[in-house]
Amino acid sequence: MTAVTKAVFPVAGLGTRFLPATKAMPKELLPIIDKPIVQFAVEEAIAAGITELIFVTGRNKRAVGDHFDANLELESQLLAKGKTELRDLVRNIVPEGVSCIFVRQPEPLGLGHAVLCAAPAVGNNPFAVLLADDLMHGTDLPTSALVAAFKDAQHTILSVSEVPEIDVTKYGILKHGAQDASGLITVQGLVEKPAVEEAPSRMASFGRYIFTPEVFDLLRALKPGSGAEIQLADAIDQLAAQGKVSAIMNPSRRYDCGDKFGYLNAIVDLALANSDYRDWFSALLRDRVAKLERNE
Ligand code: G1P
């Protein structure tokens, strides 16, 4: 039995939906109040026992590396001002015993291609993939649930949730069988962004996966699929045809932070979930809603 200790974070996307904010800044560093989106995914992976973080970056992504690297100058300035808590906050973003590797995706050829770029760093090991745009919030997070499920299954596992019919065109949609007593759902196929009338179900795969390294050979052989890109979903579909894919329900709340509405929704919910802001922020929201209702 092999444990999952490596996680791949594809962070090469352009973030065009957030221009001009993302003209010079990686979209993964957009903050939810004071924490960059990608740090939520990294913390989720570390909480699941991952000790090697592999970032697949592209142009203009140096700041992602800087964010997870030590900044000794900032640390000593904070210490000199007696701000030890803040010093610890920046110092412990990547705790001791966890390492970061950065590989470059030379061209934006799709999510499947981005994951394939991580192959030399992953080697012959199972690995998690986390798409930082999908921000997960709650007491149980999907990567820990996937790691636990992988211990028994030892094959590819996806985190899934049901979506409204209208939204099937935005996601990888499962063709699936029954759920067993342990919560594993048999996956028979995965269709990337199908038309509503062609969707095999309403069960969508979200940005959390665990793969065995055999996925790399399938990715290498893939032709461009949906959107003329090398699709991770197409490799999963092939693995599913061989009976080597299961899914588990996402145990947390998901926010699509690649989208402005999802991003705003995450900020509102996480502010309300934080005892530092909850009282005044909910008072502010109530006041604004009351004004809206009075048409002010
Ligand atoms: C990617 C995947 C898709 C998945 C989605 C949400 O699409 O290709 O299968 O459902 O993430 O996690 P993207 O949103 O990057 O276009």
Image (cartoon, grey):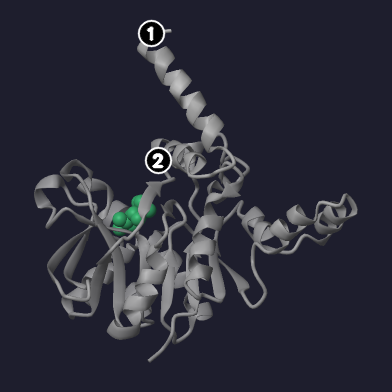
Is residue 104 depicted above or below 288 in this figure?
Answer: below
| Residue lying farthest to the right in this orientation | 80
**For marks 1 and 2 on the same chain, the one whose residue lies earlier in the sequence:** 2
Quadrant where ligand 1 appears: bottom left
Which part of the image, by quadrant, shows the N terminus? bottom left
Estimate the x, y position of residue 91 in percent, counting from the top left: 72, 62
Asked if residue 121 lies left or right of residue 3, the reply is right
- Mark 1 or 2, closer to the camera: 1
| Residue lying farthest to the bottom in this orientation | 1
Q: Quick one: 141 or 235, which is closer to the camera?
A: 141
The CA distance from mark 1 to mark 2 is 25 Å
Estimate the x, y position of residue 33 in percent, counting from the top left: 58, 41
Badge 1 density bin: few <14, some 14–19, many ≥20, Cα 10 Å = few
Examine the rendering and report whether any part of residue 21 can be seen.
Answer: yes
Q: Residue at x 34, y 79 (%)?
A: 150
Asked if residue 76 lies left or right of residue 117, the reply is right
Is residue 75 depicted above or below 144 in this figure?
Answer: above
Estimate the x, y position of residue 16 in percent, counting from the top left: 47, 41
Asked if residue 218 lies left or right of residue 23, the reply is left
Q: Quick one: 216 or 124, which is closer to the camera?
A: 124
Q: Residue at x 32, y 62 (%)?
A: 231
User: Label 2 is placed on what type of residue?
Assistant: Gly
Q: Quick one: 254 or 199, which is closer to the camera?
A: 254
Residues under numbered marks 1 and 2 in contact, where contact means CB atoms less than 8 Å apart: no
Q: Quick one: 180 or 160, which is closer to the camera?
A: 180
Q: Circle 1 sits on which residue?
A: 295
Q: Secondary structure at mark 2?
A: helix
Q: Residue at x 27, y 52 (%)?
A: 171
User: Label 1 is placed on what type of residue?
Assistant: Asn
Q: Circle 2 sits on which residue?
A: 262
